[in-house]
Image (spheres, rainbow, N blue to C red):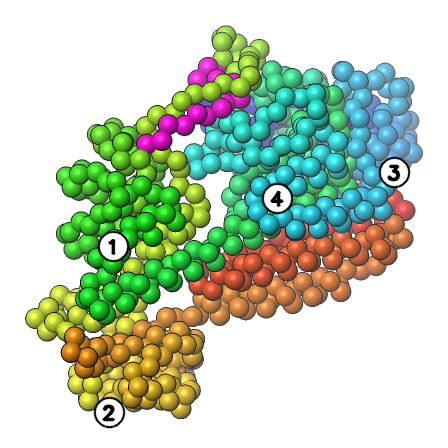
Amino acid sequence: MSNSPAFGQADLSNCEREQIHLAGSIQPHGALLVLDASTLAVRQASANCAAMLGIGAQELLGSGLERLGEPLASQVRGLAPLLGPEETRPLRARLDAAPVSGGSAAGREFEGLVHRLGALLIVELEPLADPADAAGGAGVAARGAAHSVSYEPAALLELLTPAVQRIGAASNLAALFDATVQIFRDLTGYDRVMTYKFDPDGHGKIVAEARHPRLETLLGHHYPASDIPQRARELYLRTRVRVLVDVHYDAVPLVPRTLPDGAELDMSLCYLRSMSPLHLQYLKNMGVNATLVVSLVREGQLWGLIACHHDAPRKLFYPVRAACEMLAEVVATRLAAIENQAHAQVDILVRRLEQRLIEATSTEGDWRLALFRNPRTLLQPLEATGAALYYEDEILTGGEVPSTPELRALRQWFDGRTRNALFQCSSVARENAALASLTPTASGVLAVRLSDARPDYLVWFRKEQLQTVTWAGDPSKPMVANDPLELSPRRSFAAWSEIVRGTAVPWSRKEIVFAGAIGTALVDIIAQVNAVRLLIAEHQIAKVRATITSSQEPVLVAGVDGAPSFANPTFCALVGRSGPAIDDCVGGGVECLAALFAEPAAARAMLRRLSASHEPWRGETHVLRPDGARIPVSVRAEVVPGRDGKVLGYLLILIDRTENRRAADALQHLEQSLSRTAVGLPPGNEPLRGPAAEPLVSALLANASMAAMDIGDVVSGPTIAPMLEELESSIRRATALYQRIREYAAERS
């Protein structure tokens, strides 16, 4: 891995690739042991074992963990088969080691973490009291002992219960982030606590802050993506809580440096793992002595961080760290629920637009004119300044847009660059200098594709908007000397502002969702319009038939009085019948389509009302395939009127609701899981029973239930089931962490 510098050997030109997971050393407030998983024989040990554990690293190598006492070995032996991938479990034991030269750890109580790495077990131990002075101060950071943050179990629960309730009560993101930073500061006591959000380019912004009054605010400051290398971001996903006790610590090496096979130890999941010298210098330049960083994960991605800074050494014992991780899960759950509320609002707006376009198609024969008749209704929800519709080689526009040649050049550029039928950028000039002339009217572009066969798009534009961005120091001055270990990426973190030109306000998640929903609605409308054309314009039937055939919407057009019908392949595939079979069915009249449904009597009644009184049929039912399979569908059946008022035929659109059923099953499974969680927690010792524990469990479950209801408000789209499954996974993780706190306390009592 010649392109990846070893730990501690990176400079500012290659720190993005520094192998920070192969640190080969730890922070000195604990000790680390690498064991053979089958025999518990020590393969590696931190050099401070003599001072920390009472037996030197060299003496421990090759011996069994029993050398430190059977209580510790017994716990590790019992935890080993329970460890899953990427999982750490806590332990608490009193060492029973015999005195050796320099002192003894016999009788001292330790807490620790255990995780598996292939055929190895990694055990990290921290004393519950500072190491004895008999060791000459070894194992204590050079600047003195760190202040330790710990709580009695009942007191911790009393803090967590209202914290979870407060997070669950947040109605918007601003309230959620403000509550989060205050809760974490109250719990941990750090001087400054910040919510740090990543933008699509990886840059960070402080969106909330709780701080000691003596400190200047960093709220609203931006930090360049280079401040947190990609490898560090990957580790934040794997290890959700990271603590730096003292930035001035002297790293403790592993003995030996490598494993018996010559490989370096992968310390990705090690809580005690040393931090990059570049990162430590960065913190020193900020005047920070101790840090706590907790990951905020949304849909498997690193959404942001809860970053805590302190001006003196500070250590958190395991229950507090576990509580921080649990609270971060609760925050992420509430974040998902609040952001998902935007989907429900989008759904309402899209339905209104869809209805207006359908009415225009029926009365005017063209939905495109209605789309731009009142441009404000199209532009305002996305705060766009212009829009353009590329459809069948024509361009319709509204608001402020580039010239027609510029619009065609723009489409030629972004066509083919769409991802999931969508393209978005906030600076066309930065992405393609040849299109810089578009900046005044179309610096920002958000495009949704409307056809797989043609380059048809609906596009929104945002004109250039000069922005003043406040950075924490000048990001364009990474260092002012040649020695990267003496100076961090920048020495000054004083607020530094710049005016950003040639860019528009970035598209928000809600706006992107709205654009995608409109695109989906237009695809549906286009399918309907083309189906109507099949009846109205026989001379265009070949062209329209090709369009409908390629549509992913299941569409059936039925004539009146036994006239020929047409069902596209998607419709035929959904109902499990061929086109001729459907023609035979329709030959007896539209009411005979009832044979396609699992409840034919109810379907026949609805179809009779459609043909007799021209009353549309919209509802949910099941298609019955010839093989007996029942497919849940939404039905939209419409009368197709001619300009003279006569009925030309009928339009039947089916929407496969299998995904929605999956979402309903996921919601039911979640509710059952919550119910089992509510009654399934085993009894604990006295400090964790009674009125102190029950409100916390209730708050966790109430937060999850509220999130589930918010997510369930969105009644369309394939993303609901994964979101509910993610919510279930999150509440399982939170309750598991709560249970570990209980187990930990039980060991202590």
Give the answer, above or below, for where 411 lies relative to 17. below
Seen at 34% across and 60% down, the residue is: 353
Q: Say if the magenta span includes residue 303.
A: no
> In this figure, which residue is indicated by the disc labeled 2?
588
**Magenta stretch: dominant secondary structure:** loop
Question: In the visual, does 211 lie left or right of 632?
Answer: right
Coordinates of residue 593 in the picture (x, y in percent) = 30, 86
Q: Which kind of residue does numbered mark 1 sit on?
A: Arg
> Can you tell which of label 1 and label 2 is closer to the viewer?
1
Q: Which kind of residue does numbered mark 3 sit on?
A: Arg
> In this figure, which residue is indicated by the disc labeled 1?
373
Q: Which kind of residue does numbered mark 4 sit on?
A: Leu
Tell me how many marks there are. 4
State yes or no: discs 2 and 4 in contact (Cβ < 8 Å): no
Give the answer, above or below, for where 335 lies relative to 97. below
> In this figure, which residue is indicated by the disc labeled 3?
94
User: How many other residues sit within 10 Å of disc 3, few (<14), some (14-19) or many (≥20)?
Assistant: some
Marks 3 and 4, how far apart at CA: 41 Å
Coordinates of residue 311 in the picture (x, y in percent) = 71, 21
Q: Nearer the viewer, residue 127 or 345?
A: 345
State yes or no: discs 2 and 3 in contact (Cβ < 8 Å): no
> Can you tell which of label 4 and label 1 is closer to the viewer?
1
Q: Residue furthest top?
A: 481
Query: What range is drawn magenta here?
Result: 464-478
> In this figure, which residue is indicated by the disc labeled 4?
176
Q: Secondary structure at mark 4?
A: helix
Q: Secondary structure at mark 2?
A: loop
Question: In the visual, does 512 lie left or right of 695?
Answer: left
| For marks 2 and 3 on the same chain, the one whose residue lies earlier in the sequence | 3
User: How many other residues sit within 10 Å of disc 2, few (<14), some (14-19) or many (≥20)?
Assistant: some
